[in-house]
Image: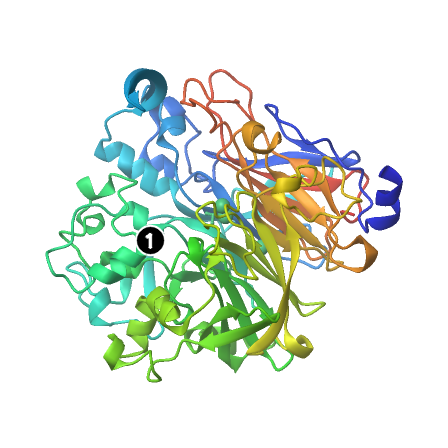
Amino acid sequence: RAEAQEVASSFDFAEIAAGVDETHHVADGYDADVLLRWGDKVLADAPDFDPMNQTAEAQAKQFGYNNDYVGFVPLNEAEDRGLLVVNHEYTNAELMFPNFAKVVTVTEEKDGQQVETQKVEIGEFTKELVDIEMAAHGGTVIEIARDENGKWKPVLDSQYNRRITTETEMQLSGPVAGHARVKTNADPSGTKVFGTLNNCAGGLTPWGTWLMAEENTHGYFGGALPEGHREELNYKRMGVPGGWYNWGNFHDRFDVSKEPNEPNRFGWIVEVDPKDPNSKPKKRTALGRFKHEGCETVVNSDGRVVCYSGDDERFDYVYKFVTSGTYSESDPATNADLLDDGTLYVARFDEDGTVEWMPLVHGEAPLDEAHGFASQADVLIETRRAADLLGATKMDRPEDVQPNPKTGKVYCMLTNNTRRKEGDENAANPRADNAFGHIIEITETDGDFASTKSTWEILLKCGDPSVAEVGASFSSATTENGWFGMPDNCAIDAEGRLWVSTDGNSESQTGRTDGLWAVDTDGEARGTSKLFFRVPVGAEMCGPYFTPSSETLFLAVQHPGDEGLATYEQPATRWPDFDDNLPVRPAVVTVTKQGGGKIA
Ligand code: FEO
Ligand code: CA
Ligand code: CA
Ligand code: CA
């Protein structure tokens, strides 16, 4: 087996062992250094992290919680200085706030029996705690540079450093801007939104802006819609109000009984110019409203820009957006509002191996008045319902969708779907009770990313290949460390090779933590996977982002310590500080090769 792997894999590194422990691990010959942790200074005048006395004001100047997407915009040719952009997807109150959560024993009825179980009970939310949560969401722009030892360090006095939070003023742009369905008491113009929510993955555009994908935005809303409100069906399809947070108790806009239109102002792709710290982020409504996992872009051969995005929900869809205008390398003004005008398509994966990209354009049946769509704005606000009507293929939770500019292929991470019943399988989602997910490879016709008819095949069915019932399809050269479940994010390196990170592997599920795996897609090695990095217990692996030269890899360790009965006082690990006086902290890690060179 080991011999077969030597022949097969196009990756040189020595694979690490899969497993579970309190810290991270990277392949021999590489350094993995913690760069930025929750609470670290982003702005020069931020106070030192003091978790026992945290305030919203301090948090708004410090690195936020649960780092997810990571991107890097070089500021010089040497790539030793640049802007790191990071999404802060959500908060874990039980791990953030001291003396807030505790483990309690409760008696529950199970199958007619009284059973004692332990669970984590959360304390009472105050406005102060909610405001800290709101300030810990959003994103960070921070300049980083390599020091004399080649180590990446934040540049705290940089003019570019910026925190984006739930309070940052943003502009709603594109077809939905100013529409009646996005007007609120606080914003009668329907164009001025405060903040962004649940920014999961994202992307960088060819012109160096950062796309933050708003994913599970339904969770932030509470209250009940007024009876017979026109958004009833729309919100039901999006799960609004989700009631995951208590923000509506302190801020009217998160209570749909008071501000019924506010949820329509979230669920978009947000474009941020990291090189202009005073710029107003723009919510690009032309790209649709759903639970965007990410938004990865590629310049097509004709100059148009194509953006891929998955809707992360069981039985939801894969989308792409093709701009009307073309990208200009020399004229930034041409690119400034490119994302406001174009065509959004949803994918139908047919049994014969073709993908039909179906346009979501108002006016043609069924996206017309008869079906409740009076304009393109209506189609975009209710993207999911429009896609339902077109008969898009119901997928097993689409996460990252990544084009490979070198090959014309596109990789769709489908993380899992245990609610798919026997009989409900389709060719593109072939497993019922799909606990471990799969990866689809789309081949855009003749390398034309704007193509409306493409082909697809399954690259990998994930899970343990040694358990026959799982039906995994890793190559036989894949070792017992090399397989994974639950693909989530991915990246393409400078050589055009695929790297996949995961969300949901654990001791009990797969006998391993999440991590980053290198996956061969071509030739004899196709379907061979090798483990390069693994996270500490409880964490999910986010980020992966390679600098253009592939000499640095940025990784985001999200929600470390969040396993079992985890609280601030008793997390499953105290990574990365391992200091009893500090909480476990999500952090961004840099990976570099010892002695320099490409990550291989
Ligand atoms: Fe935030 Fe789809 O994971
Ligand atoms: Ca994700
Ligand atoms: Ca990606
Ligand atoms: Ca996920």
> Looking at the image, in which quadrant does ligand 3 appear?
bottom right
Residue at point 61% right, 29% down? 511
Residue at point 67% right, 67% down? 405
Structure colour scheme: rainbow
Q: Quadrant of the N terminus?
A: top right
Q: Nearer the viewer, residue 28 or 187?
A: 28
Q: Where is residue 420 in the image (x, y as percent from the top left)?
A: 46, 50
Q: How many marks?
A: 1
Q: Position of residue 148 (x, y in %)?
A: 73, 39
Residue at the outermost bottom position: 364
> In the shown orientation, is residue 242 left or right of residue 532?
left
Q: In this view, does 117 lie above or below 501?
A: above
Q: In this view, does 564 lie above or below 426?
A: above
Q: Can residue 432 be seen in this view?
A: yes
Q: Is residue 201 above or below residue 308?
A: above
> In the shown orientation, is residue 119 left or right of residue 246?
right
Specify the quadrant of the image occupied by residue 482: top right
Mark 1 highlights which residue?
195
Q: Which residue type carries mark 1?
A: Gly
Q: Position of residue 11 (x, y in %)?
A: 80, 48
Q: Is residue 387 above or below residue 123?
A: below
